[in-house]
Amino acid sequence: MLIPNRHFSPFKLFLDKPTRTAVMLNPKVLTTFTRHFLTDGFAQHHGRTDPSEGRYRLLSVPRRFPVAPLTHFAGFIADPGRYALYALVRNPYGRLLSAWRNKFLDGHSRSPDHSDAAYSRGIRRNELQPLRRYAATHGLPGGAPATLIPFSTFLAYVASHPPGQRDHHWDAQTRVLMTDRLRYTRIWRIEDELPEGFLTLGQRLSFPETWIRHRLETPVNPSKGRASSYTPELATLAQRIIAEDLAHFGYSADSWQDY
């Protein structure tokens, strides 16, 4: 029986009971692409015009992603081993950088006056003010309203929280995917195993191979810039956050140089 951690959500777990296929979504790792892949695949090849077949009508996510019946989630929690369970992971240095860019750099740039009110609602509610207080308390840039929170301050703030207690966008992928309590059939690295991953999932769900390959021709993770963001000092700080991911998923500790 699965004892879920704080990161578990039915909206991040795809279940297809007929094929016993399960996919755990991993924030900042092609979640939008994966949702579209599943939703469009069922619509185009199985005639499912509503991805969740009318369930949870008052919620928005089930209109954009196949959300299984509650009884199926209960069955998974009771015995996860009945499903072939899959996930995607990303270079943890790149994932941290993507989280900062998306949640803080983009938020800072969203309004001409760099107002804190322009940040996404979730970041405003849960992270922005604690992060600014942390920066001000520790004499780091980014403590004042309407100022940019640099990547260095973001890393220091994240490192100050214990693994498993961070936001799911930048907590260790081992914690988000609950690798300590779930046995995965396969976990693919998107940098070098992406086609294998989606071909496997698509074939299990009876999506045509030509359609799958066509979907993969579209860039799924475009870069927002090639300027180097890490220094040796920042990489050392990041390693305090991502050590579990580096070891568990086989990424090089020196791969920060690619970012």
Image (cartoon, rainbow, N blue to C red):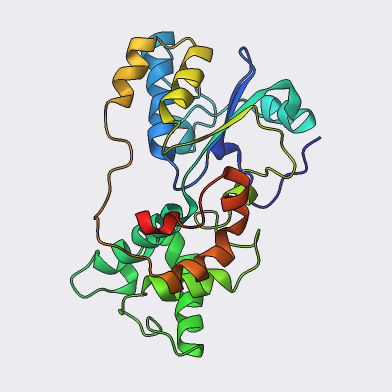
**Viewer-nearest residue: 250 or 18:** 250
Q: Is residue 215 above or below residue 30?
A: above
Residue extending furthest right? 1
Asked if residue 51 can be seen in this view, the reply is no
Q: Is residue 75 above or below residue 111?
A: above
Image-quadrant location for residue 8: top right
Q: Is residue 123 above or below residue 62?
A: below
**Viewer-nearest residue: 244 or 163:** 244
**Viewer-nearest residue: 38 or 124:** 38
Residue 248 x %, y %:
63, 46
Asked if residue 21 can be seen in this view, the reply is yes
Quadrant in which the N terminus appears: top right
Left or right of 179? Residue 34 is left
**Residue at x-position 46% and y-position 23%:** 196
Residue 35 x %, y %:
43, 32
Image-quadrant location for residue 160: bottom right
Quadrant in which the C terminus appears: bottom left
Residue 104 x %, y %:
36, 66
Give the tally of numbered discs.
0
Residue extending furthest left? 112
Residue 212 x %, y %:
37, 18
Q: Is residue 186 above or below residue 206?
A: below
**Residue at x-position 29% and y-position 19%:** 214
